[in-house]
Amino acid sequence: MSDEILVIDETVSRSASIRTALESEGFSVYASTDHDRSIELMEYYYPRLVIVSVDYQTDTLKLLKSIDRWTETPVITISSFGNIDIKLECFKCGANDYVGAPFHIDELVARVKVALRYASTRDQHKRLFSDGDLKIDFDERKVIIHNNEIGLTPIEHSLLYELVNNEGKILEHGYLLGKVWGKEYIAEKVYLHVYVSHLRNKINTNENHQYIRNIPKVGYLFKKRMNDCGLKKRLEP
């Protein structure tokens, strides 16, 4: 299965050129010119990488913050502006790379491959988790709390994997449903609430800390014990 990439660019001709180049390299590419529609596409396809034009700065910076708030998907920004302040703002809002236009399409493709390679390497290091009395080995499907192994269902393991490996980020209901159950279940919030409730009862054993937190009307958040002090700041818009 090829990696899926979302291209968000108001310049239709440039978006088409990027799409053609990436598809020739074997990627599956989805394109959008509308920011609201882009969020919907991200929730449905869960792309491995996003390319965003920042030629219309205000709305795009808000979009970058939204992407950074609920996913670790790498983002490459492209722009006709060479202003250093704009570049810095993009990085502050969550961009992983910045390519100034005009650019050679081969350079952008090369940067996409590097970003995906880095993301794959990062993901390989997320199979083990340890935080105080909670230890998880996702390869062995073992969860240990207070030196006691607890039993989880396959769905609970998959749900916990998504939460842990996006630690500190708010994961929206649709994202979790699509990742764990499949894209056709993104509206079935009851499934999610039931399984999260079971999972919280099993791992939230410390009365002074709740690993899995409910973000009303939005989704769920997994927090390490050591990072409690940063929760309020992350939840601020």
Image (cartoon, rainbow, N blue to C red):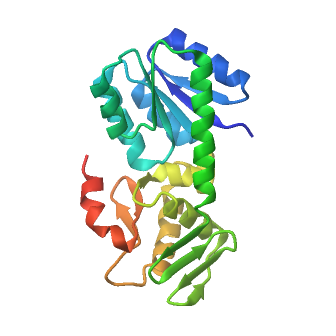
Side of 34 relative to 16 (left or right): left
Q: Position of residue 86 (x, y in %)?
A: 30, 26
Q: Position of residue 134 (x, y in %)?
A: 49, 80
The residue at 54%/48% (across/down) is 186
Asked which quadrant contains residue 152, the reply is: bottom right
Please name whichever residue, 164 or 125, is drawn nearer the observer in this view of the structure: 125
Total marks placed:
0
The residue at 52%/12% (across/down) is 14
Q: Position of residue 187 (x, y in %)?
A: 51, 49
Asked which quadrant contains residue 53, the reply is: top left
The residue at 62%/51% (across/down) is 121
Q: Quadrant of the N terminus?
A: top right
Outermost residue, front direction?
Answer: 84
Would you place residue 59 above or below residue 176 in this image?
above
Asked which quadrant contains residue 208, the reply is: bottom left
Outermost residue, bottom direction?
Answer: 147
Outermost residue, top direction?
Answer: 13
Q: Is residue 47 visible?
A: no
Would you place residue 32 above or below residue 62 in this image?
above
Side of 38 relative to 47 (left or right): left
The residue at 55%/54% (across/down) is 177
Q: Is residue 225 visible?
A: yes
Please name whichever residue, 125 or 190, is drawn nearer the observer in this view of the structure: 125
Q: Position of residue 153 (x, y in %)?
A: 64, 74
Would you place residue 44 above or below residue 29 in this image?
below
